[in-house]
Amino acid sequence: MRFSSVLLGGEPKKTETVDNSTAEETPLAVVKEEKGDAVDVAEATTEVDLSIRRYRLWPLRWSVGWPTVIAYAVLPGVVLLLALTVGFAKWQAISTGEAHRSGVEATEAATEATIALLSYQPDTVESDLDAARSRLTGTFLDSYTELTQEVVIPGAKQKQISAVATVPGAALVSVTGSHAVVLLFVNQTVIVGQDAPTDTASRVRVALDKVDDRWLISEFEPV
């Protein structure tokens, strides 16, 4: 066998001719392929680097953007809310102060007017009750005028009737800028001629309307 003979040195060794063209082309192909692989690797590396840079820049962009959003959107809203809150608090304080002042004025007006309405002397009854009429308004003014002119004034003159009223207690029921309701506790002492004084106590619900900066009685109802 040829293989045995060569191994034992039986046949002369043949020299194989190498195709130079194949030998030369193979390294070039390998080099080109290696270069191509190197280019692909470089491009892939570049894409990865760009992706990493984009990923790193993304939070940076947002970190720069959020303060701007806060400065131009959130903070003005907070400032506006604070301004509205302060404004409302001031308005509420002013409204509360005005309501308190109106309540005090209405209560004083109701007290003074009631004393004037129910107090008179037989010798000055006309002037006394005419002065009281200036504290009234609306339909109650008309009713009071009719009652005093037809009943109270003639009776006081004829029978020598005198009356003195006091208001030991008053309570504000409600008040607005133009209307108020006050509950009064009224004591009245009446003397007819030479008779002994007669004392009466009553509660009166008084409604007042504000007319030309004055609190005037518009209703007067015993309760």
Image: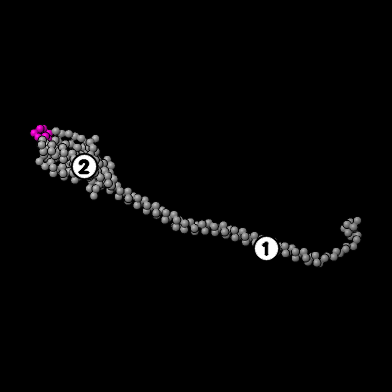
Q: Which mark is residue 81?
A: none
**What segment carries the magenta color?**
191-197
Q: Is residue 66 above or below residue 182?
A: below
Q: Which mark is residue 39?
A: 1
Q: Quadrant of residue 48?
A: bottom right
Q: Residue at x 13, y 38 (%)?
A: 154
Q: Which sits in the foreground, 26 or 169?
A: 169
Task: Pinpoint residue 223: horizontal percent, then vertical percent.
Answer: 24, 35
Task: Pinpoint residue 116: horizontal percent, then vertical percent.
Answer: 17, 42
Residue type of the residue flagged with mark 1: Val
* Left or right: where 171 falls relative to 49: left
**Which quadrant holds the N terminus?**
bottom right
Tag 1's secondary structure? helix
Task: Pinpoint residue 85: horizontal percent, then vertical percent.
Answer: 36, 51
- How is the rendered protein coloured? one colour
User: Badge 1 local density, few (<14 within 10 Å), some, or many (20+)?
Assistant: few
Q: Quadrant of residue 132?
A: top left
Q: Residue at x 20, y 35 (%)?
A: 202
What residue did someone put label 2 on? 142
Q: Residue at x 23, y 37 (%)?
A: 221
Residue type of the residue flagged with mark 2: Asp
Q: CA distance from mark 2 to mark 1?
A: 111 Å
Q: Residue at x 57, y 59 (%)?
A: 54
User: Badge 2 local density, few (<14 within 10 Å), some, or many (20+)?
Assistant: few
> Is 162 a magenta residue?
no
Q: Is residue 110 visible?
A: no
Task: Pinpoint residue 83: horizontal percent, then vertical percent.
Answer: 37, 53
Badge 2 or badge 1: first in the primary sequence? 1
Q: Which of pointers 2 and 1 indicates the residue nearer the eye?
A: 2
